[in-house]
C-alpha cells in the first residue's frame, strides 16, 4: 500500500509519558501510521504521489477529541445573534435592539448564549426585555441549551397561552394567573414554540454543519463524541462523509428519552455500529436531569428556590431498567447527570446492570457538576467514565459564588464544583469536552480551563476551585488517550504508534510547556484525520 503522507522534522509527543519519542518523522498509509523513524528513513518511503510536509520542529500529538459536543444542533443553535458576551441586561437589550433594526417585518429573531446571571435576583422572563421585543417573534436560547425565552409574539404564534403537561421534566413557566412568562424549560417545552418558527432548508443545515466542522478542524480537533442524533443529523453526516467533506471522526450517541417503549429501545440497539468512513453510531445518550441554572437538575436537597427536586424521567426506575437492557445488549450509555441525586442514581443503575451480568461495557456520566465525597470513588469502582466540561465552571460560575449556579446550590455544594482533580485521583477515567454549543469548542481552551479554572474572557479573575485543576499532561490525556479508552478504541487511537489511526494535531510548540493562560493562543499548524490534512496553516 502506498505512502500517502509523510511528516518530517517533527517532535512526536507521547501523551502517556509526556515525553517526546526518539523518532522525528512518521509515514501514513491506508489511514494508519505505517512507520516511525528518522527523517531520511521515512522520506525514503515517499513517492511522487505522497504529500510530504516538513514540520520544522513543530509538535505532533495524537488527534484531539472533544468528549462531548453537538455538531448538528450546535450549528443550528449558533445561527443567529450571539448574546454570550453580554454581562448585564443593558447589554442584552442593546444587542437585541440592534438585531431588531436589521430584521425584515415579521421575521423571527433567533439568539443564543443568554446568561441567566444578567437577570441578577430578578426572574428570568421576557418582560425584562420589553419593549425591545414588542411585536417581534423571538426565541432566545439560554446558554445551557435546556431553556429559552420566547417573546409574547412568539408564544402567540405558537398558540402557547398557558401551562402544559409533558411526559418528562419540562415546563412552560407561568405566573400566578397562569400566563406564560416566556421561560420554557427543557426540550419538550421549547419545541412547542420552535415548531412555529421557520426552519432552515436541508442545504442550509448542511452548509452550516460543514462550516462548523471546518472551524473545529482548524482549531485542532480530529474527532468528537456527538451526544445526539436529532433530526437529519445522521443523514447529514452521511452526506458529508460520502462527499469527502467530513473533517472530523464522529462517534454518535442517539437519545433515549422518557416514554421510549420496548420497540424504541430495540431500534436504538439495532442502530449500533451503523455509519460510514468517518462516523458511526456507538452508544446511547440518556438524561437523568436538566440543569442547575434553570432549576431542573436533580438534587438530594432542593436548591435555594425549592427547585431541582425531580429526575428527568418521571419514574427513575424505568431509566434503570433501560440501562440494564442496553447493558445486556453490550451498548455503552452516556447519561447526562448534573446534580448529586442524578449522578448517584446513574451510578446505582450501572451497578445494578453489572451485577445482573452481561458483557463488559464502558458506561459514562456526562457533566457531574456537583457530587459529595462518597460518590467520587464509585466511578473507578464501577469503571464509569467521568465526562467533564471544565469551561462550564470557568465561564458560567464565579470563585466568590455570587453567580446563579452557586447561589442556587449554596456554599457547601458550590464548593464541590466540577471535581476533576478528585475524580482523577480516585482512579476515574476523566474525559474532557466542550458541550458545544454550550461552551466554545476550541480544544486548547478546554484544556486550558481544566488547568487554570478561570473565566476565559478575563483571566485576571480568581479561579473557581483551583484545587480541582488538572496538570498539563492530564488535560492532554483527557482529550487523547482517555477519549480513546472511553470509546473502546485504545488499541487504535489516542497514541502515536504504528498501526494506530493517522489522526494528528500539530502545534507550533508543546501544549505541555505552554502556560495555561497562553495555551488557547498556541498556533495549530496542521490537523490530520485518517491520513488526510483537514487544516494546514499557510506557514507549512
Image: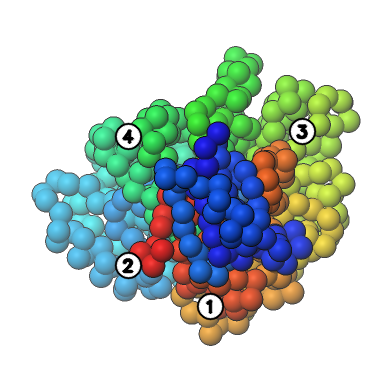
Image quarter where the N terminus lies is top right
Q: With 282 as the anchor, is 107 left or right in this view?
A: left
Q: Is residue 532 above or below residue 522?
A: above
Q: Is residue 474 above or below residue 152?
A: below
Q: Secondary structure at mark 2?
A: helix
Counting from the top left corner in percent of width and height, residue 196 is at 28, 36
Q: Which residue is mark 2?
A: 92
Q: Are marks 1 and 3 in contact (CB under 8 Å)?
A: no
From the viewer's perspective, is the residue at label 1 or at label 3 nearer? Answer: 1
Counting from the top left corner in percent of width and height, residue 451 is at 65, 71
Question: CA–CA distance between discs 1 and 3?
Answer: 38 Å
Q: Mark 4 Cα within 10 Å, few/some/many (few <14, many 20+)?
A: few
Q: Which residue is mark 1?
A: 518
Q: Which residue is mark 3?
A: 361
Instruction: Give the mark nearer the N terminus: 4 vs 3.
Output: 4
Q: Secondary structure at mark 4?
A: loop
Q: Which residue is mark 4?
A: 195
**24 and 127: which one is in front?**
24
Q: With 529 as the anchor, is 316 left or right in this view?
A: right
Q: Is residue 459 above or below residue 34?
A: below
From the viewer's perspective, is the residue at label 2 or at label 3 nearer? Answer: 3
Question: CA–CA distance between discs 1 and 2?
Answer: 29 Å
Q: With 89 as the anchor, is 201 left or right in this view?
A: left
**348 and 79: which one is in front?**
79
Q: Mark 2 Cα within 10 Å, few/some/many (few <14, many 20+)?
A: many
Amino acid at each position: 500500500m502506498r505512502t500517502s503522507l509523510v511528516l518530517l522534522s517533527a517532535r512526536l509527543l507521547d501523551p502517556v509519558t509526556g515525553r517526546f519519542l526518539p523518532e522525528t518523522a512518521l509515514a501514513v498509509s491506508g489511514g494508519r501510521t505505517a512507520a516511525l523513524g528518522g527523517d531520511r528513513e521515512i522520506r525514503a518511503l515517499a513517492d511522487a504521489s505522497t504529500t510530504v510536509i516538513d514540520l520544522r520542529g513543530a509538535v505532533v500529538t495524537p488527534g484531539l477529541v472533544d468528549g462531548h459536543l453537538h455538531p448538528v444542533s450546535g450549528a443550528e443553535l449558533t445561527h443567529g445573534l450571539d448574546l454570550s458576551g453580554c454581562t448585564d441586561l443593558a447589554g442584552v437589550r442593546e444587542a437585541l435592539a440592534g438585531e431588531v433594526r436589521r430584521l425584515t417585518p415579521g421575521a423571527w429573531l433567533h439568539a443564543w448564549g443568554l446568561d441567566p446571571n444578567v437577570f441578577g435576583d430578578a426572574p428570568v422572563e421576557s418582560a425584562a426585555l420589553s419593549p425591545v421585543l414588542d411585536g417581534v417573534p423571538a426565541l432566545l436560547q439560554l446558554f445551557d441549551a435546556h431553556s429559552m425565552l420566547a417573546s409574547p409574539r412568539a408564544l402567540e404564534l405558537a398558540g402557547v397561552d398557558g401551562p402544559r403537561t409533558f411526559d418528562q421534566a419540562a415546563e412552560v413557566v407561568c405566573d400566578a394567573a397562569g400566563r406564560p412568562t416566556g421561560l420554557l424549560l427543557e426540550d419538550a417545552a421549547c419545541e412547542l414554540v420552535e415548531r412555529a418558527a421557520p426552519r432552515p432548508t436541508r442545504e442550509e443545515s448542511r452548509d452550516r454543519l460543514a462550516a462548523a466542522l471546518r472551524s473545529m478542524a482548524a482549531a485542532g480537533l480530529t474527532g468528537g463524541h456527538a451526544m445526539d442524533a436529532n433530526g437529519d443529523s445522521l443523514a447529514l453526516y452521511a452526506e458529508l462523509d460520502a462527499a469527502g467533506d467530513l473533517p472530523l471522526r464522529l462517534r454518535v450517541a442517539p437519545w433515549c428519552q422518557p416514554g421510549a417503549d420496548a420497540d424504541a429501545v430495540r431500534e436504538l440497539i439495532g442502530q449500533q455500529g451503523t455509519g460510514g468512513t468517518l462516523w458511526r453510531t456507538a452508544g446511547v445518550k440518556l438524561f437523568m436531569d436538566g440543569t442547575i441554572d434553570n432549576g431542573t437538575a436533580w438534587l438530594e436537597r432542593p436548591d435555594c428556590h425549592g427547585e431541582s427536586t425531580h429526575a428527568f424521567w418521571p419514574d427513575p426506575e424505568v431509566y434503570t431498567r433501560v440501562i440494564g437492557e442496553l447493558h445486556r445488549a453490550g451498548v455503552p450509555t452516556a447519561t447526562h447527570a448534573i446534580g448529586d441525586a442524578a449522578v448517584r442514581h446513574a451510578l446505582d443503575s450501572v451497578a445494578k446492570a453489572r451485577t445482573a451480568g452481561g458483557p463488559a461495557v464502558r458506561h459514562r456520566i456526562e457533566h457531574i457538576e456537583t457530587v459529595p465525597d462518597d460518590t467520587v470513588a464509585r466511578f473507578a469502582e464501577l469503571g464509569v467514565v467521568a465526562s467533564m466540561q471544565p469551561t462550564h465552571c470557568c465561564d458560567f460560575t464565579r470563585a466568590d459564588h455570587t453567580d446563579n449556579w452557586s447561589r442556587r446550590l449554596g456554599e457547601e455544594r458550590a464548593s464541590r464544583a466540577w471535581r476533576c482533580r478528585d475524580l482523577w485521583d480516585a482512579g476515574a477515567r476523566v474525559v474532557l469536552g466542550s458541550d458545544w454549543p454550550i461552551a466554545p469548542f476550541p480544544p486548547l481552551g478546554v484544556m486550558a480551563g481544566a488547568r487554570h479554572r478561570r473565566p476565559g474572557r478575563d483571566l485576571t479573575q480568581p479561579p473557581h476551585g483551583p484545587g480541582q485543576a488538572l496538570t498539563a499532561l492530564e488535560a492532554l490525556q483527557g482529550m487523547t488517550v482517555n477519549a480513546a479508552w472511553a470509546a473502546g478504541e485504545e488499541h487504535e487511537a489516542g497514541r502515536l504508534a504504528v498501526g494506530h489511526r493517522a489522526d494528528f494535531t500539530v502545534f507550533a510548540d508543546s501544549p505541555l510547556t505552554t502556560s495555561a493562560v497562553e495555551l488557547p493562543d498556541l498556533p495549530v499548524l496542521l490537523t490530520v484525520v485518517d491520513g488526510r490534512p483537514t487544516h494546514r496553516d499557510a506557514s507549512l
